[in-house]
Image (cartoon, rainbow, N blue to C red):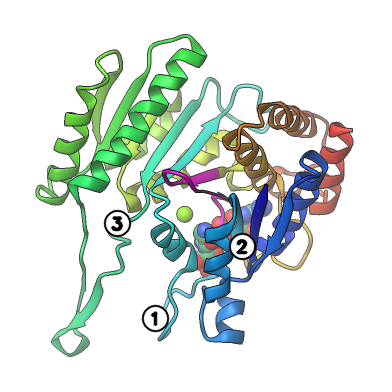
Amino acid sequence: MRICVIPGDGIGPEVMGAATRVLRALAPDAELHEAMAGWGAFERHGTALPEPTLAAARNADAILFGAVASPSHAVPGYRSPIVQLRRDLDLYANLRPVTSGANLASPTEGCDLVIVRENTEGLYAGRERLEDDGATAIAERVITRRASARIARAAFELARRRATDLGRPGRVTIVHKANVLRVSDGLFRETVLTVARDFPELAVEEALVDVAAMRLAQSPARFDVLVTTNLFGDILSDVACIHGGGLGLAASANLGDSRGLFEPVHGAAPDIAGRGIANPLAAITCVAMLLEWRGRPEPAARLRAAIAATLRDGPRTPDRGGDGTTAAVTDAVLAQLA
Ligand code: NAI
Ligand code: MG
């Protein structure tokens, strides 16, 4: 199993250090190749996603990605490498699960949902420009039938698997804003509803994105699988992750037809970077997701149990109210595994 590890910037290298320690313990046969991307790479090499990194990602069986720091102002030549990787590797489905359940860090009861976010187009299509001597900025929101149909299929298939695994009926919520974005979200909505006909056993509902945000904050237990476009999914997953114990615990998978990239939902966290106090559990949970995706359920289940035990027994990083370090939490997970 060849794993391409892209630590990135800020706390990315700190949490990837933790994740790779755990991965080595659970999959001693894995070959890890480290590759660079992000702001640091851009400063050193003039590109945020150097060609050797893209090649290493293409050749790997799976990718572990930390986080990158992308400036909030335009920098000529800089493009977000994670957005680029998702598109170049056609990792069209971003799966962002949030569970309370056995998760002692969760402030919520009964939340067990997955946000399925379209990952290759929408407002992140990179079609932005200035007109009118810079007085008007335009972003094009690209929605295609093809991308909408395949993200819908990924969501409905996931809901079907979850219904079987959990022994209860499945439900998919289509999140859009087709009342205003009639053309683009109109196409998304209509395409997803067409795919839904192939899954008659699943309940299907629609929610406009604003009310979906409110319901996610207020009553997350009513959701099962949510399917939505790129920007809405990005925002809603940070809302939803509160119910799983916050950004320090939220992990995600970016999946294509044969490739997988696993990354924490959080970013480079410049406010805490370099202090050794980032919560590594989101990145470590990515290792569990990677192992499950690679067909290694036994070590993945052991890891999930070790994470649950660490949440119960501590130590805790400051985001969870403790004074533990990244290294101490990782040591605890490794000790629980042993
Ligand atoms: P962020 O997710 O980096 O941080 C938001 C807040 O959560 C901060 O207060 C941070 O300290 C805290 N936090 C995040 N992860 C944590 C962890 N593991 N343990 C403890 N606390 C944690 O989002 P922010 O501040 O909006 O963005 C910072 C930078 O990260 C920006 O340059 C942005 O472009 C980039 N970013 C990158 C992403 C990626 O690489 N996929 C995703 C989101 C943001
Ligand atoms: Mg985000």
Answer left or right for 181 relative to 78. left
Q: Is residue 155 above or below residue 287?
A: above
- Amino acid type of the residue tagged 3 in the rendering: Glu
* Residue at the disc numbered 1: 74
Q: Is residue 111 above or below residue 92?
A: above
Q: Is residue 144 above or below residue 157?
A: below
- Mark 1 vs mark 3: give the one in front: 3
Mark 3 neighbour density, 10 Å: few (under 14) some (14–19) many (20 or more): many
- Res. 139 mark: none
Q: In which quadrant is the C terminus drawn?
A: top right
Residue at 15%, 51% in the rendered image: 184
Identify the image quadrant of residue 84.
bottom left
Answer left or right for 28 relative to 108. right
Identify the image quadrant of residue 190.
top left
Residue at 81%, 39% in the rendered image: 333
Say which element carries label 2: loop
Mark 2 neighbour density, 10 Å: few (under 14) some (14–19) many (20 or more): some
* Residue at the disc numbered 2: 269
Q: Is residue 47 above or below residue 151?
A: below
- Mark 2 vs mark 1: give the one in front: 1
Task: Give the magenta-colored segment's residue range.
Answer: 252-269
Looking at the image, the residue that sits furthest to the top is 167
Which numbered disc, 2 or 1, marks the residue that appears first in the sequence? 1
Distance, label 2 to label 3, CA atoms, is 25 Å
Distance, label 2 to label 1, CA atoms, is 20 Å
Which numbered disc, 2 or 3, marks the residue that appears first in the sequence? 3
- Res. 121 mark: 3
- Amino acid type of the residue tagged 2 in the rendering: Ala
